[in-house]
Image (cartoon, helix red, strand yellow):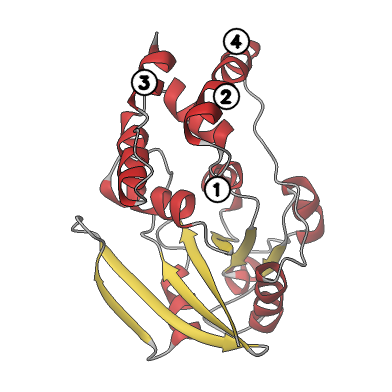
Amino acid sequence: MSSYRIALAGNPNTGKSTLFNLLTGLRQHTGNWPGKTVIHAEGEFRHNESKFTIIDLPGTYSLYSNSADEEVARDYIVFEKPEVTLVVLDATSIERNLNLALQVLEMTDRVIVCLNLMDEAKKKGIEVNSEALSMKLGAPVVKISARNKTGIKELLDTVDEMAKGNVPTNPYRMTYSEDIEAKIEELTPKVRQMIGDDFPIRWIALRLLDGDESIIESLNNYFRKESKGGGVSNVSVNATT
């Protein structure tokens, strides 16, 4: 039986935990992330003869490392490289929730956008063209109501197919000002030379340009753990000079 990992990301109050509990039932456990006071929740389920471990990342509004929760969510997606990152959005507040989805799409191309609370959206007269949104984002968009258990089979079928590498994506990438894009282009090869191609190089370059020193610390911790040595602190100097 094949085994895959799913990262479950989303803003607070999107029904993310409801979906996690629905999928895992009693097959879950909690603790703390290593070195953090942030709660770590993990569970398991099976679908289409595949076994899935799902990690419920802390609910966050961004992944800019403004808090321990954001750093935990960011680092898991970047360094653990789950087969699927499932981003749960509130279908009644898509515009507000899309900020997080766009950030995740810059970090990995294995993303499924899950529009939850479709029952509430229907009550408010909100209609969502999921196909058009999927085309715009370059990733699958699935409508569900975790509370009412609707759309779950389609979601799990999509998760299973993506985990097996059968769902091609073309994630939307933000385009910034000419000045920022020029700096990204200049910095990207330096970052690639130091850390290789196993990470979202463009996204890391953006974080360095923004002066996010915590990503340097996380990269150093990763390389120390993997015994690859070296560290990457010089990238910080290059990015901020």
Of pointers 3 and 2, the one earlier in the residue sequence: 2
Give the CA separation, mark 2 to mark 4.
14 Å
Name the side, left or right, on which 231 lies relative to 119: left
Q: Quadrant of the C terminus?
A: top left
Give the CA separation, mark 1 to mark 2.
19 Å
Q: Position of residue 229 (x, y in %)?
A: 34, 39
Of pointers 4 and 3, the one earlier in the residue sequence: 4
Q: Amino acid at mark 1?
A: Val
| 1 or 3: mark nearer the eye | 3
Name the side, left or right, on which 102 lies relative to 170: left
Choose between 212 and 127: the one closer to the eye: 212
Q: Position of residue 87 (x, y in %)?
A: 55, 59
Q: Answer above or below: position of 7 versus 97.
A: below
| Mark 4, secondary structure of its residue | helix
Choose between 66 and 161: the one closer to the eye: 161
Q: Which disc number belongs to residue 188? A: 2
- Identify the residue position indicated by label 3 in the image: 234
| Mark 3, secondary structure of its residue | helix
| 2 or 4: mark nearer the eye | 2
Q: Position of residue 235 (x, y in %)?
A: 41, 22
Q: Amino acid at mark 4?
A: Asp
Circle 1: is it few (<14), some (14-19), or many (20+) Cα within 10 Å?
many
- Identify the residue position indicated by label 1 in the image: 104
Circle 2: is it few (<14), some (14-19), or many (20+) Cα within 10 Å?
some
Q: Amino acid at mark 2?
A: Thr
**Is label 4 in contact with label 3 (beta carbons under 8 Å)?**
no
Residue for point 56% across, 54% down: 93
- Identify the residue position indicated by label 4 in the image: 179
